[in-house]
Amino acid sequence: MSLQPVKIGLLGLGTVGGGTINVLRRNAGEIARRAGRGIVVVSAAARDPGKARSLALDGIRVAGDANAIVADPEVEIVCELIGGIEPARTLVLAAIARGKHVVTANKALIALHGNEIFAAASRKGVMVAFEAAVAGGIPIIKAIREGLSGNRIQTVAGIINGTCNYILTEMRQLGGDFQDVLAEAQRLGYAEADPTTDIDGIDAAHKLTILASIAFGIPLQFDKVYTEGIGRVGVMDIAYAEELGYRIKSLGIARHGGDGIELRVHPTLIPKRHPIAGVEGVMNAVLVVGDAVGPTMFYGRGAGAEPTASAVVSDLVDVVRAMTSDPENRVPHLAFQPDAISNIIVKPMEEVRTAYYLRLSAVDKPGVLANVTAILGSLDISIEAIIQKEPDKNANVVPVIFLTQRVVEKNMNEAISRIEALDSVRGNVFRMRVETLE
Ligand code: NDP
Ligand code: HSE
């Protein structure tokens, strides 16, 4: 290994930036044996360089201006670990314009501006690698883009937000208060700078956008993902689901049917016997079903400093290995050749078929359930199970839970608005979707 080490400029010295420095230092020998050259961070930027004092930065020049790192002629690979859209987008495009390769963990940036970024990178013949953008330490991008490239992929579904899974797990196991559990996820470095991005399902939708693109060969189209967060899931829903044999998980689901693609993120009841139901805490799991391989599952830490750094460093190794290769012969950014991307339609949510969990508060008197079941029946919605809980004597209402069979979402929307209009039903009907993942 007589070649000089490859020099990295790191933008961002937070959770992932700090983890990346640690992993590169600790495993320097193994990394160099794999890459064929050493990989060293020569300069780094943070808004407030003073805050990074706790990191082992010896030998790394730290700047407050990220542009200086991008412009540094010594830097061959720019590693963007700032997050968000701006200034990350401008910095990444500036690095590409200077002919530098880029590694990023920024799913928001790739989901929203990846089409532009990859086009710019292809014109310049540089690589933009983004393994850490989806499912933290799980090498799911590489698995789909390379390991499963012989397959027609039918489904990609799973737990792709560590913060939500951590919160749902803590709520079920300890009955913890939502805000306290979220604060703990933030302290552990799992949550985004704005944690509503996690809770509202937006972070998972960014990741699903990327997964769907590399699985089906479609453009990145974040605006087509149906997104619902976990904010309305109550401890009682988790308990009712358990009673019915299900566990609630926030799932990202991308499914290729004959008539279009489903792209959706929402809290979902899945059977307790399914392996994904046992994925707890910050762990992520992604199920990928291909026509040749059948179902495959990928499991690991979905967030946190070193698990994410594991993915960032694997990208650095990949880029170093391919730096001297002909750009035409590299793995395409989005798995499919850019001129072979297809425009298959993404189905509106109203046309998706799924089963449902409904929770409503009914006035405690005879005939109420008959009215609700009549509405469901009139819209071809078959009931799988009903449970009625003890009445709330103060409010004179009973919580009633329905599990239905699969039906097209527009029928369920109609049923819910008719049920909510009944005099004998109080407040809104709370709905979650149910998937068997079979
Ligand atoms: P942090 O908030 O911990 O770190 C962000 C870093 O970027 C800080 O050092 C911050 O500096 C610096 N920064 C912010 N704005 C600028 C700027 N304008 N110029 C220079 N530096 C700037 O974020 P994370 O490390 O958690 O996340 C980084 C990226 O990795 C995000 O895209 C995130 O989505 C992604 N990611 C995160 C995971 C995780 O588990 N945390 C997992 C997978 C991906 P300062 O502190 O001084 O403001
Ligand atoms: N906030 C993200 C999560 C980080 O909780 O999954 C990993 O992408």
Image (cartoon, helix red, strand yellow):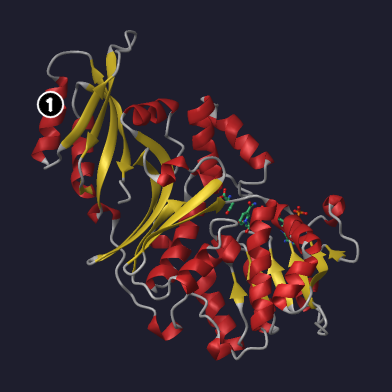
Q: Residue at x 51, y 63 (%)?
A: 140
Q: Amino acid at mark 1?
A: Asn
Task: Left or right? Give the position of 278 relative to 52.
Answer: left
Task: Left or right? Give the position of 386 relative to 333.
Answer: left
Q: Residue at x 42, y 45 (%)?
A: 275
Report the front residue among 377 and 139. 139
Q: Is residue 87 visible?
A: no
Q: Residue at x 87, y 52 (%)?
A: 53
Q: Residue furthest top?
A: 393
Q: Is residue 176 visible?
A: yes
> Ligand 1 sits in which quadrant?
bottom right
In the rendering, at what x and y percent does residue 199 appear? 51, 43
In the rendering, at what x and y percent does residue 130 appear? 58, 68
Report the front residue among 338 and 95. 338
Residue 118 versus residue 428 in the image, above or below: below
Q: Quadrant of residue 390?
A: top left
Dividing the image into 4 quarters, which one contains the N terminus? bottom right
Report the front residue among 335 and 370. 335
Residue 1 versus residue 348 in the image, above or below: below
Q: Is mark 1 within 8 Å of ligand 2?
A: no
Q: Disc 1 designates what residue? A: 371
Q: Quadrant of residue 211?
A: bottom left
